[in-house]
Amino acid sequence: MSDSKVAIVTGASRGIGFSVAEALAKAGYHLAICGTREETVNAAAEKLSIHKVEVLPRVVNVADGEAVQAFVQEVAKHFGRLDVLVNNAGITRDGLSMRMKGEDWQAVIDTNLSSVFYASQAVLKPMMRAKAGRIINISSVVASMGNPGQINYCASKGGIDAMTRSLAREVGSRNITVNAIAPGFIGTDMTDELGDDAKDALIAQVPLGRLGSPEDIAATVLFLSGESGGYITGQVLHVNGGMYM
């Protein structure tokens, strides 16, 4: 069994997921990361490896329960332990409700919400055996605020918040904490492509006067993963610069 702690991060190829994985690597966690494309997940693993930790990269369809189960079993067997799960993988298929296609609704629910159930269920056995564990789900401020054109995305993230509270009650007696982090507007590749006017309109909604960074979310994950977060469970932590209070 590895002496270092082990974390799984889904959707870790870029953006928030990569920053979360990097923060955990810098803290000495061995990592298992997954994404949808082999070249990007392998590139991410190579970058993370400079922090002198072992990184296991895999291509996994997180909407496929059997694939997620196989991935988690491989990780637990490879490292001999499993301490942290960060459910970060997510997609958008935006559109107004009146015209939203059924497949766009289902794809977002499967990838954003069902995947959290599959991965959380899969890690419970090794975590219960160890009588310790941290499950951290990446939600969104829009689960609380709502957002036009994102009924599928908002529903998936609202489901994550509810699942977080329910699972926390189920597994708290085994010293497993379950929490969610709800980012606000985060500066990523997607927001970088916006024009100045659109970006200024976003920032105008944030009392702190700036977009968040992926590192802001990663720091919160690191806090919840460590001893300092050990008495926090069933919570949705809003990291949004004050745009939702």
Image: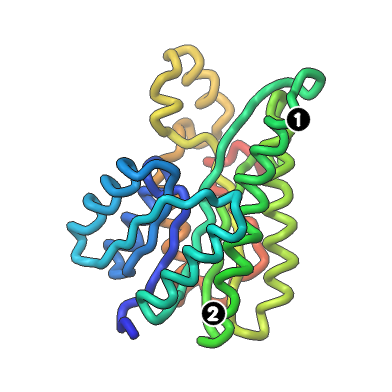
SS at badge 1: helix
List x then y, in percent, for residue 42. 29, 49
Secondary structure at badge 2 equals: helix
- Sequence-first disc among 1 and 2: 1
Residue for point 65% across, 38% down: 107
**Where is residue 222, by image quadrant?**
bottom left
Above or below, 131 against 113 in this view is: below
Closer to us: 192 or 11: 11
Front in this rendered view, residue 103 or 225? 103
Going by the numbered disc 2, the residue's amino acid type is Met
218, 159: nearer the viewer: 159
Identified at 68% across, 30% down, the residue is 104
Circles 1, 2 touching at the beta carbon (< 8 Å): no
- Of the pair 180 and 46, the residue shown nearer to us: 46
Instruction: Determine which quarter of the picture holds residue 103.
Output: top right
Residue position marked by numbered label 1 in the rendering: 102
Specify whether residue 145 is in view: no
Residue 231 seen anywhere in this rendered image of the structure? yes
Amino acid residing under circle 1: Gly
* Percent x, y of residue 61: 52, 49
Q: How many marks?
A: 2
Select label 1 or label 2 by which is in front: 1
Using the image, determine if residue 106 lies above or below residue 182. Answer: above
43 lies left or right of 185: left
Q: Residues within 10 Å of mark 1 (few under 14, many from 20)?
A: few
Q: Residue at x 36, y 76 (%)?
A: 79
x and y percent of residue 199 in the render? 47, 20
Quadrant of the drawing holding the C terminus: top right
Residue under circle 2?
127
Quadrant in which the N terminus is drawn: bottom left
